[in-house]
Amino acid sequence: MKSAIRSTAELARELGVSRWTVSRALNGHAGVDPITEERIKETASRHGFAPSLLGRGLRSGRTDQAGICLPDLVDYFLTTKITLLQQALQAQGLSPVLQILDGRPETENAALERFAAMRCAGVVVIASQLSDSAAGFRSLAAADIPLVRIDPLNLLSPASVSSDRRAAMKMAVRHLHDLGHRRVIVAGLNGESPYGRQRLEGLRAGCRALKWNFERDVLLLSHPDTRDDFSAGRVLAQTYLTERSGISAVLAVNDRTALGFVRTLQDHGLNVPSDVSVIGYDNADFSPYASPALTTLDPQVDQLIAHAVRLLVSRSTAGPKPPGGVTLIKPRLVRRASDGPPPRTKRTGRKTSALP
């Protein structure tokens, strides 16, 4: 049966209250008696009535929607970021609208232009590949819609919040150095990708600071063409075993690759960490439950998302906008059980190869 109530004005007449009271109650604003607010919401629900987002946007210039542009979910593993981002936006009274992209700049531009036409309250773009002069960004600016970038491929993009991948790698090399390692395998890193280049820069800087020779002391094993990162870790471990490099420290591109690497070493009779130390990246949910529990670099996604949403909200308020600079979130090393000193012979204490 069609609802007899089609507007906030009709709902106000039905309840004998002002349209202002109805509007504030339905939009979650303060200043309405809790009993009255509950009565308004119950009556609206009973009649199947919801306020028009389009009408609200036309009156205020903004809806309560927050546009989110997401890259390919398979390649970027965004489950945690999306969950935290949705929760943080909802806590600010915003309704997230997700647009999954296909890797083409024109698709990202089109999504941003749609968000501008929808009069979104703000837009968040994850892993944007667009330049600052892109048409989609110009559309948002023309509509005075605030924008925040999370982990843009261009690290210098304005109004952005990024994981400090360079600092993560410097931290990892320093940690291994302090344990006594002087060479390291880097497993699965794509040095041609923007994020991979940032990590390589961090590795080089870490080596310089410790007087390591990057070309001699860092062995890069490229990510193989496999169906998933767990399988990639197994393939990379086989390569490591075949080359018999004697290097007893491994930095994996992520925790999934690290786990596949560890399992293959164990299948070949090696112990982690007494024979080989393995460090992952991401601090995935399964990492504490691996055997051994995986030491990893935590990019602190909760801090990344919280800062991005605070920046978005601050840029949404009236008055002068805060500077749209670049914020880097420093990672932390989560020490568990998969790393330790280099292997040594029991009698002489001399370092020995981890490989049979």
Image (cartoon, rainbow, N blue to C red):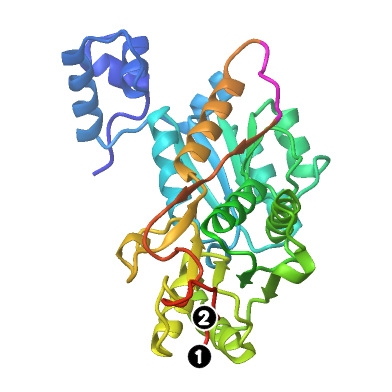
Query: SS for tag 1?
Result: loop
Query: How far separated are the C-alphas under marks 2 and 1?
Result: 7 Å
> Which residue corresponds to the image point at 70% horizontal and 28% vertical from the top-left?
143
Is residue 1 found left or right of 174 in the rendered image? left
Mark 1 burial class by Cα count in 10 Å: few <14, some 14-19, many 20+ = few
User: Residue 214's image quarter?
Assistant: bottom right
Residues tagged 2 and 1 counted as in contact (Cβ below 8 A): no
What amino acid type should be assigned to the residue bearing mark 1? Pro
Q: Which residue is mark 1?
A: 356
Q: Which residue is mark 2?
A: 354
Q: Which residues are magenta?
A: 320-325
Overall secondary structure of the magenta section:
loop
Is residue 157 found left or right of 125 in the rendered image? right
> Which residue corresponds to the image point at 74% horizontal and 54% vertical from the top-left?
211
Outermost residue, right side: 133
Question: Can the viewer see residue 295 in this picture?
Answer: yes
Q: Name the quarter where the N terminus is drawn.
A: top left
